[in-house]
Amino acid sequence: MKAACSASFATLSFAALVLAAACGGEPPSARAPAAPPPARPDVAAPAPAPAPVALAALDVDPVLVGLGRTNAGPGGPDDAALARAGIERLCDESLARATALLDEIRALDGAADDALTWDATAGKLDRARLALRNAGDFPALMAVSHPDDGVREKAKLCEPKLDKLDTALWLDPKLARVMKRYAAKKEALPAARARLVARTLRDFRRNGLDLDERGQARLRELNETLTKLSLDFDSNLAESHLTVEATPAELAGLPESFLVSHPPNKDGKVVLTTDYPDYFPVLTYAKDRKLALALFKQFENRAADANIPVLEKILTLRAEKAKLLGYATWADYVLEPRMAKDPKAVSTFLETLRQHLARKGRAELAEFKSAHVKLGGKATDAIPPSDRLYLEDQVRKAKFGLDSKEVSKYFEVRRVKDGLLDITSKLFGVRYRPAANAPTWHPDVEAVEVTDAAGKPIGRFYFDLYPRDGKYKHAAVFSIRDTAKMPDGSRLLPIAAIECNFPKPGGAAPALMSHQDAVTFFHEFGHVIHHLLSEAELSSFAGTSVARDFVESPSQMLEEWAWHKDTLALFARHHDTNAPLPAPLHAAMLRSRGFGRAIATQRQLYLSALDQAYHTRPLPFDTTKVLAEVHDAYTPFKYVEGTHFQASFGHLIGYDAGYYGYQWALSIAQDLFTRFKKEGLMNPKTAADYRANILAPGDSDDAAKLVERFLGRSPSDAAYKAFLLE
């Protein structure tokens, strides 16, 4: 789930996010509730409380309001103008709702203890958080996905307003006094409510309430500047359009469908972009490896001129903010509320994996070199990282009889989508139907309503699956609205959007996905399910608002359904003949699955270690030199001089000091999967237990406890370590 995390769990805007995963309500560790402030005769009696804001006012449909429209169907010529106004209205009115709710809490400063109830304090703060998310989530999505650049620019204006209010919230002494006094009453509360109170006290500390006036002023400046720089980084990347030209002859080896969809221009050249649908096929299949290396260099240099100075400024300001708040490094600050807790634990985790994979990594590299020689290379050649996917594919074909181009013929985009919906419908007892009255921001976008078996609505999501100019370049899920239990016992319906860049149907060639694309699709939809099937009482703990090093676990586990023969049989059919995926081809897929996993994981460890290095090393340093150093320490390939991957490593913005979480969460995912593996991937009892114990609670309890309840034992990394060596 994609998310840009603010310092506090109250807002957690889904703005500058990247994969997804989701940020959750997780700032620092809670500390003991403070004692109530002593009576102060010099403080005037509190002003009358403002008129309450009805919770119904928070039941806004951000898509309807944000697009400035009231119905579905094709838009008109004024759509962009309506959306520019709608985005501003959604942001400003939702912030006004949040402000009004916070004012009601502030008005209790100095009130009698019996006025300090759950509903008047922490419960109201949770509703304010919902309003803040309503303000920021849909604009964050539109900032990277709306087709009109004017709408994208207007949408970017919301997050600075949101962050300004968020910063003010956590530096507000009146609000803090009310919340501390309520906590000091030590009311008997359900576990999730007590957890929210403790988190709130924790976040006042983490967000600078204990700083003096000068320190708080500087913190506000830092937060505002960091927000702007993060938006700039994402925008620069989204707007980067680097290309390479090739002759048709240089495209030898590419699938026929790719060649048909890439005809030569008037100069006889084919223009290849750094977007995923061009980049990965060229690196995987092109026989001309000089062409692949040229495109690799362009890919690694996306937004380099603009984003390197932006990144280096961000790192400097993050380090300053961490020290201002009393932390040694930005990583120390970020990791305090996560499962890992501190940089030392992350370092130990990464180093343990590096050693665990060393032997298998060397064996895989030897096979890569052997394939390189068979293809005409020299044994003494240094293999560039641009050849990793190509050589991996060649070995799979020669050793396992697997032709990935042949495999892709069984993964047409629409069939995969239908299969994914069929599987998750059966697994979780839900139904999908078109959301007939939901407007969309582009003709390619499809709105889907999710109901229970009886037809009762559970939530809504949007498929936005195909690339276009100005759109988010990766794959991620964005929250649009969180869920929460309403006062009448009903549930506010959650909304999300899944953003991908798959081949688009309807062209001259069939829209065929690689199997890896299909796995990615299942992964991202795991975030959708996590978001929509939440039953948390509080919006602060709803859905994917879990620890960042746990949030990927449900998605990573769902990837397994894209591998199993019984689930593949539901959708993997030849695009032309409708024949099912042949058993020998599937067997070859399974035999080859583990090959390349060590080297691929070493790349993930490199990215994780780079993220940690950027956020733990004393400044200043040259980010490119650090990148080259970490790259060569963790991967078997040599850094390619003149490339600047850090400029397009979007997770440095949304997952700062947290990229390790993908591998951390994968360990948990493999542990969770052991029960499905034993009891059946489509076992309704297992799926119901999983939904109740993992998906439904959100962050209402610690992730480790949720895992233990589902598995019936303590978590273990045994399945993960075995998986890595398969």
Image: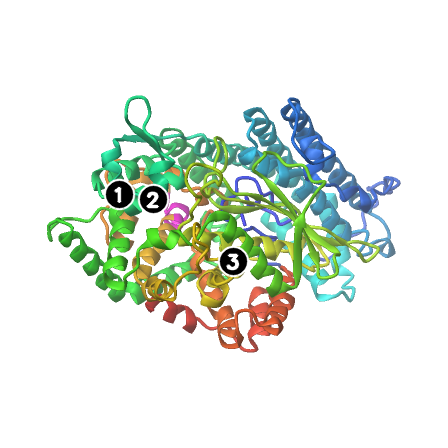
Whether residues under marks 3 and 1 lie with C-beta atoms below 8 angstroms apart, the answer is no
What type is the residue that disc 1 sits on?
Ala
Q: Is residue 671 left or right of residue 129?
A: left
Which image quarter: residue 445? Answer: top right
Q: Secondary structure at mark 3?
A: helix
82 above or below 643?
A: above
Q: Earlier in the sequence, mark 3 or mark 2?
A: 2
Q: Position of residue 318 (x, y in %)?
A: 47, 41
Q: What predominant SS class does the magenta segment belong to?
A: helix
Question: What is the CA distance from the residue labelled 3 to the residue labelled 2?
Answer: 24 Å
Q: Residue at x 56, y 37 (%)?
A: 444
Residue 592 painted magenta: no
Q: Nearer the viewer, residue 414 or 361?
A: 414
Residue tagged 3:
555
Residue tagged 2:
281
**Range of the magenta residues?**
611-618
Instruction: Bin the neighbour count of mark 2 within 10 Å (Cα to Cα): few under 14, some 14-19, many 20 and up.
Output: some
